[in-house]
Structures are given as structure tokens and as C-alpha cells.
Amino acid sequence: MKRVAILISGSGSNMVRLVESMTGDHPARPVLVASNDPSAVGLQKAAGLGIATAAVDHSRFPQDRAGFEAELLGPLLDASPDILCLAGFMRVLTPKFVAKFTGRMLNIHPSLLPLYPGLDTHARAISAGDSEAGATVHEVTPELDSGPILGQVRVPILPGDTEQSLAARVLEQEHRLYPAVLRRFAEGDRSPLML
């Protein structure tokens, strides 16, 4: 049974879907949900689901990513995860941190990578006149949003779409994609899943 730790920064909606999926014959189980924000609503949700939680307030480490990551590694390594899932974790991780989890760290990003790495993905897709947007699950590598793609889901951009309306529809599909990719990844299948 694979042990899964999940990093969040906010409401934790993708985290909840991942946790809910890891039951029955699923090859993985959640062991920790950690956040860079002690007030993240997702921590309360995780606790309510019976998952251990940890928080390291990144604001205590201005201009010191290495210090923040060193403190975050404490509870993470104590949990001994086989897989680390980033689920709305809004901190850029250093290459040194990423190297500790090479081949074992996943992220979900709200665009059809390699299009629109980084922030403001929905606004960028709309302003570019794209006909579709979507989400990508990928392995995390030191270069932002550029690791091997493990899964994608496409969402049409509708006439009159705003950043908010598109984001809401993409998030619904993220909730389908991420659990499906995690299950396959935990089984050792790294072939891209296209929903």
C-alpha cells in the first residue's frame, strides 16, 4: 500500500477528492495533509476526514524558501510518503526540495500544459482566443510546470466565459482527473491519461 502526503494552500477541494478516492481496492492511502497556511480551510476538511495535518506558515520565512522547506520536511518525512501530491499548493519549491521526491511528486495545473505555466491560466487562455482550456497532472521537476505529463482533461471555452466561470468548470474536471491519475500512478502506470 502506497502512502500519500498532500500539500495544499487553500480550500483543499482537490485534496478531498484524492482522499475520498483512496478507499477499497485503491493501491494508496492518505497519511498527511500539510499546508503553508495554518488557516487553510482544507486543513479542517482533512482533519474531519481523519487525516493527520501539519502547517508551516510560509510568512515566517520572508526571502527564505530553504528555511520554509526545511521546516516543512519535518512532518513530511515523519509521514514517510511514497507519493507526494501538490493540490493547489501555491509555493514554488526549490530544486533541492524537488530532488528529495524525484519521480514521486505530482501536481495538478489548470491549463493544457505546456500552454500557460504559472499563474492566471484561465485569463491567458481566454485572452488568447483559445477554443478550449483544461487541466494537466504532471510529475514535478525543478523547472516550473514542465515535468512529464501524466494526464489531461479538456474543457471548452464558451462564448462569454469569464476567468471565474471557466475556472469553475475546469475545477470540476480536475476533480475527475487527479484521482484517476493518482490511482494509475500508485499502480506503477505512468502512461498519460487523456479524459
Image: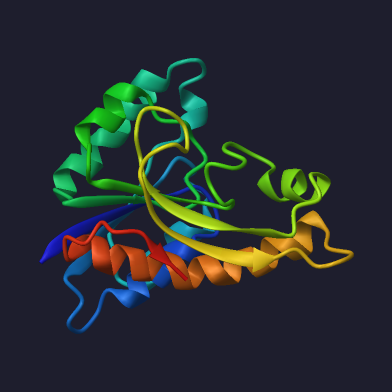
Tell me what residue is drawn at x 39 percent, y 37 percent: 56
Q: Quadrant of residue 95?
A: top left
Counting from the top left corner in percent of width and height, residue 29 is at 21, 67
**In the picture shown, does residue 140 fall above or below 64?**
below
Tell me what residue is drawn at x 22 percent, y 37 percent: 102
Q: Quadrant of residue 117?
A: top right
Residue projecting furthest to the bottom: 24
Residue projecting furthest to the right: 160
**In the picture shown, does residue 14 fall above or below 147?**
below
**In the picture shown, does residue 36 fall above or below 59?**
below
**In the picture shown, does residue 62 fall above or below 74?**
above
Residue projecting furthest to the left: 1
Q: Is residue 175 visible?
A: yes
Residue 176 or residue 13, whichever sits in front: 176
Counting from the top left corner in percent of width and height, residue 93 is at 40, 30
Residue 98 or residue 137, whichever sits in front: 137
Counting from the top left corner in percent of width and height, residue 151 is at 41, 59
Counting from the top left corner in percent of width and height, residue 118 is at 58, 36
User: In screen coordinates, is 43 left or right of 170?
Assistant: left
User: In screen coordinates, is 44 left or right of 168?
Assistant: left
Q: Quadrant of residue 50?
A: bottom left
State which quarter of the image contains the N terminus: bottom left
User: In screen coordinates, is 117 left or right of 186?
Assistant: right
Residue 56 or residue 169, whichever sits in front: 169
How many numbered marks appear? 0
Q: Is residue 18 visible?
A: no
User: In screen coordinates, is 51 left or right of 194?
Assistant: left
Residue 4 or residue 129, whichever sits in front: 129
